[in-house]
Image (tube, grey):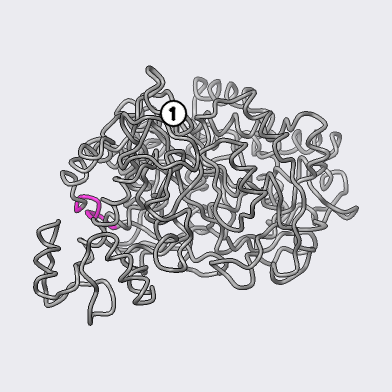
Amino acid sequence: MHISSLPGPFATGTVGSEARAFVRQLSDMGCAYWQILPINHITEENSPYTNRSLFALNPNFIDLPALEGEGLLTRDEVGDVMLPGGQLAPDLAILEKKKLVLLRKAYSRIGDEKRAEVAAFAQKNASWLDSYALFAVLKNVFGDACWNEWPGIGLRLHKEDAVERAFAEYENDVMFWKYVQCTAYSQWAALKRYANDLGVGIIGDIPIYASYDSSDVWACNHLFQLNTKHIPKQVAGVPPDYFNKNGQLWCNPLYDWDEMKKDGYAWWMSRLENALEIYDIVRIDHFRGFHSYWAVPYANKTAKKGSWAKGPGMDIVRKMKARFSDSSFIAEDLGDVDAAVKRFFVSAGYPGMRVMQFGFGKGGDAAHKLKNIDELCVAYTGTHDNNTIVGWCGDAPGETRDAAFAELGLPPAGAAGAAGVAGGTRASGAAGAAKASAKGSPPSDERICEAWIEALFQSQARLAIVPVQDLLHQGSESRMNFPGTVSPGNWSYRVKEGQLESIRAQWLYALNKKTKRLNKFSGTGGPGEAAGTGAKGAAGTGAASAASAGGKRAPAKAGATAKAGAGAKKGAAAAKTKTGKAEAGAKKGGAAARKG
């Protein structure tokens, strides 16, 4: 579950009291991980995979009541940005503008102690914060125009003399943005400490690509494939796939890997180091892009006419392994994966992802079938790019759905044609399923979701992760993202007040215990570590709403099968998203919609 999906009185979830309440709930349910989507400062398109910066955090997630507690805002000021009753998905661009007005008021009221804190934070993070803060100021000065349209070639190309003059001219505004990031980082760190103290680790997610209209591309344009007019030569995406017959056109500029190699991929290493300060474990989105990436000529309207280009491969992975623990990462390995890419994943050695929805029926992907899920992976019922369990059961062909039900020990959906409650019966648990079967009634949504989750936890996957929608037995209306589409519904899913309390906490706790996944995050180990490795092996469960790590099982090689309940350590996994929308319609060099 993403931060934005948390309930609360504001237009989006925040790192405030609702986040802490959810952490306590995860801890009480025996879950040791909470997986989220990227928390970078996003564009107005609202996708967590678009970004103003790959380092800066989203100001919308700042908890305003905490600033009220510091005496920097009044109760009335905070109340001005609270939602009208029942409103769940307003325009987040408008929210950010309103929130920034309040943050400017808070900044105008800080004292010497806070100024010193901001200065120390700014000094520590100068490598990315200086360019981001100035970028944010100049975006406002130039009417939100893309950086390649700013007046003066010196600013457009981030030339040192032009940048220094701009810093001097807009010094106070630059310091405001540094204050915003200092606040966002300190509040996030406080939430993470709170979670870790309760035995819950945070699994984060980082997009593989930067958005074109971002401080990263502006300040480090030499690291990207841009032409002499600083427009992308080719852009990122994926070919036609399960999600979209036209492929997915993300429109991010591609990396110049030859240039990055010259300094040992220093930009990427600093980015990973930053991510591991923010999260306990990091899922790297579209990890196959390190091996080879889909390059689409600029200005194409679909991803069909792209071609595969060679990435840095094991060269960058060796740099990662030399600098970071294997247990730090999860490699998103979904999508178009041929034999060469599979060998790359095996050589890299990081846990990959398995998705139950992809494994059912005659056309199911063998790697995602429950019986083939091995220990060195993180397994999901579905990810943020998938339908919910209930939605999948309603949309799947009858033969595929019934095959899934049979494998999970559920009675067929029968004449109902889809998952649902028949005749008002809402049977629960194995006894309920048997009762429903005897009556010829289809299983309830609740029982269907529980059967899927039980099967996932009984698999030998090192970590098992469940989207919060599946714990709440929700349908397609609660889906987080429709990949390859530009839809106002993408990324807008929000849990309503009181819904989280309806999760059957005792059932989930008992399931964690039964499948030997009842452990706590201890700050060591991770999904890349084998089980039973002593001090490094505190396993865990966590969740997109609830994720579970295996307990005391023997390590298994990638591709091998082991007993159900397999397991392991802490670890984690996440889901993959990409955008529904993204910097659509960028002019001249502006990137277009990253449709994920």
Viewer can see residue 150: yes
Q: Quadrant of residue 32?
A: top left
> Residue 60: x, y in percent?
47, 48
> Residue 289: x, y in percent?
67, 48
Q: Is disc 1 placed on a helix, strand or loop? A: loop
Q: Is residue 492 above or below residue 485?
A: above
Question: Is 16 left, or right, of 259 in this rendering?
Answer: left
Question: Is 459 left, or right, of 590 in this rendering?
Answer: left
Residue numbers of the magenta segment: 496-502
Count up the numbered dots: 1
Q: Nearer the viewer, residue 191 or 293?
A: 293
Q: Amino acid at mark 1?
A: Ala
Viewer can see residue 64: no
Report the residue at 36% width, 42% height from top: 460
Q: Quadrant of residue 313?
A: top right
> Residue 145: x, y in percent?
72, 57
Report the residue at 25% width, 55% height from top: 497
The outermost residue toward the right is: 228
Q: Nearer the viewer, residue 80 or 355?
A: 355
| Residue 391 inside the magenta-drawn segment | no
Report the residue at 63% width, 65% height from top: 248
* Residue located beneath label 1 in the image: 530
> Residue 526: x, y in percent?
44, 30
Near mark 1 (Cα within 10 A), the count class, few <14, some 14-19 or many ≥20, is many
The outermost residue toward the top is: 535
Q: Is residue 406 above or below residue 65?
A: below
Q: Quadrant of residue 570?
A: top left
- Identify the image quadrant of the C terminus: bottom right
